[in-house]
Image (cartoon, rainbow, N blue to C red):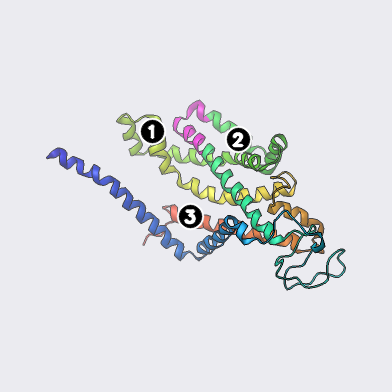
Amino acid sequence: MAGERASVPTLLTPFAEVRARRSATQRALRMLRRNRLGLLGAGILSIVVLAAILAPFLTPYDPMTGDITKRLTCPVLTRCPSFMPGATPVRGTLDHPLGTDQLGRDIFSRIVYGARVSLIVGLAAVLLGAGFGSTLGLVSGYYGGRIDALIMRIGELFLAFPYLLLAIAIVAVLGGGLLNVIIVLAIATWVPYARIMRGSVLSAKEQEYVIAARAIGVRDLALLFKHVAPNCITPIIVFGTFNVAAAIIAEAGLSFLGLGVGATRPTWGNMLADGRAYVATAWWLATFPGLAIMLTVLSINMIGDWLRDALDPHLRNIE
């Protein structure tokens, strides 16, 4: 009987964990409904993600194919300046609602396809950088000593170089391309994840549950990834969300400088670079991709603020 009574909590533990996770999710969703800025950010980002996924069905034109006879066509409901060489001094039409560029390519189609590149680079770079940096920070904070000193000194070496300058230097060595840009941004951003994880682990490894697990013989690898890491992942999630926005801006900056994914892919940075020569005459070439970057980054930052409030126990408003 005693053995049966002792086994009951063990059998009920998985169900208790499921209920706890479910209640935490419900609490986060209630906070999202109350947080109007977070809800607005989620709505904007959902539109951007859906547009990127459904790009072939939403865009009427090939983003890389232009019609030189329709170059610099104005956006709908606007009129092209008559002094613009090669431009038709008539109002824009619904055929090209956001106008065309200097090669006659549809701006709307290029913005929608450019969202794919920005989202892929932002998410992949953060996942790669967060995974690598968090693992090093986990090992550094748990073992300490020479391992900790070595990892932190290497991190400080990376922090000694400005972020964008370091990315430009690595791109100059590896070359452009989608995969290389992702690797570059991950290499340039792994240090903050390592430092954040290390700080969390230094506190977590002194907790009673870690000491108890170590006392009953749990191996270090299982202890790190099954017990310590799950309890230290919250600040990584919040910081990673904000860093997606930073990675999108960094990719746009590299593409603007001609060091991004290349001219064969429509990206918001490339569109800004193409439009800088027409800022005074064809304002829409740089305005619309700039607005796309601004709205996407703003929505991600709004979601990051909501996640911070929802996941931080000190800021959480429990009903």
In percent of width and height, residue 124 lies at 57, 44
Mark sitting on residue 100 = none
Q: Secondary structure at mark 1?
A: helix
| Residue furthest left as drawn | 1
Q: Main secondary structure of the magenta part?
A: helix
Residue nearest the viewer, comparing 236 with 48: 48
Q: Residue at x 51, y 30 (%)?
A: 148
Q: Quadrant of residue 71?
A: bottom right
Between discs 1 and 3, the one toward the N terminus: 1
Residue 44 is a magenta residue:
no
Residue 290 visible in image: no
Q: Which residue is mark 2?
A: 156
Task: Determine crowd level at label 2: few under 14, some 14-19, many 20+ residues with C-alpha closer than 10 A.
Answer: few
Q: Which residue is mark 1?
A: 222
Residue nearest the viewer, comparing 173 with 98: 98
Q: Which residue is mark 3?
A: 307
Whether 272 is drawn above or below 177: the answer is below
Between discs 2 and 1, the one toward the N terminus: 2
Q: Quadrant of residue 95?
A: bottom right
- Bounds of the magenta span? 134-148
Whether 23 is drawn above or below 192: the answer is below
Mark 2–mark 1 Cα distance, whole angstroms, equals: 29 Å
